[in-house]
Image (cartoon, helix red, strand yellow):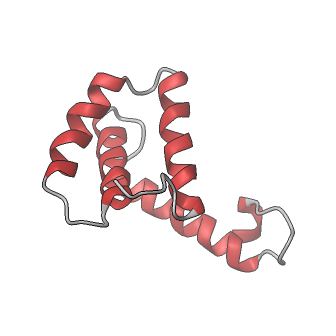
C-alpha cells in the first residue's frame, strides 16, 4: 500500500464506494477479502488501487450486481459527462447524453 492512503481522488471514491456497498448490504467483508487478498498479494508495486478496482468489479459481477461490461459502460458515461461539464459545475450523467 502507498504511504498516503489516497494519491488520487478516484482512489478515495473507490474506497468510499466499496464501504457504501458493504453498508448497504450488497457485499460482505469476508467476500471482499477473499476476492481482493489473493489479487493484491501477487500485484505489481504501485498497482494497489487498480487491483482494488479489479477485485470490486469481479465481486460485483459474481454477486450479480453489475457485470464488467456494465461497469465499463457506466465508467465511460461518467468520463464523457466530466468532459462535457464546464469547470466548477457539478457533473451529472445527463451531460453525457
Does 50 appear above or below 25? below
Whether residue 5 is visible:
yes
Q: Name the quarter where the C terminus is drawn.
A: bottom right
Q: Is residue 38 left or right of residue 35?
A: left
Q: Residue at x 32, y 57 (%)?
A: 48
Number of numbered markers: 0
Does 6 appear above or below 96? above
Q: Residue at x 30, y 47 (%)?
A: 55
Q: Give the image quarter of residue 72.
A: bottom left
Q: Residue at x 62, y 64 (%)?
A: 78
Residue 46: percent from left, percent from top: 31, 67
Foreground residue among 57 and 14: 14
Q: Is residue 2 left or right of residue 20?
A: left
Whether residue 97 is visible:
no
Q: Residue at x 55, y 60 (%)?
A: 10
Q: Give the image quarter of residue 84.
A: bottom right
Q: Is residue 56 left or right of residue 95?
A: left
Does 91 appear above or below 19? below
Residue 89: percent from left, percent from top: 86, 68
Q: Residue furthest front?
A: 3
Residue 66: percent from left, percent from top: 41, 44
Residue 19: percent from left, percent from top: 51, 33
Amino acid at each position: 500500500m502507498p504511504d498516503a492512503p489516497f494519491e488520487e481522488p478516484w482512489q478515495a471514491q473507490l474506497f468510499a464506494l466499496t464501504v457504501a456497498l458493504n453498508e448497504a448490504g450488497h457485499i460482505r467483508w469476508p467476500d471482499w477479502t477473499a476476492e481482493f487478498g489473493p489479487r493484491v498479494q501477487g500485484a505489481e508495486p504501485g498497482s494497489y488501487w487498480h487491483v482494488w478496482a479489479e477485485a470490486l468489479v469481479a465481486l460485483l459481477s459474481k454477486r450479480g450486481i453489475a457485470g464488467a461490461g456494465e461497469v465499463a459502460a457506466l465508467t465511460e458515461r461518467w468520463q464523457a459527462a466530466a468532459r462535457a461539464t464546464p469547470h466548477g459545475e457539478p457533473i451529472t450523467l445527463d451531460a453525457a447524453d
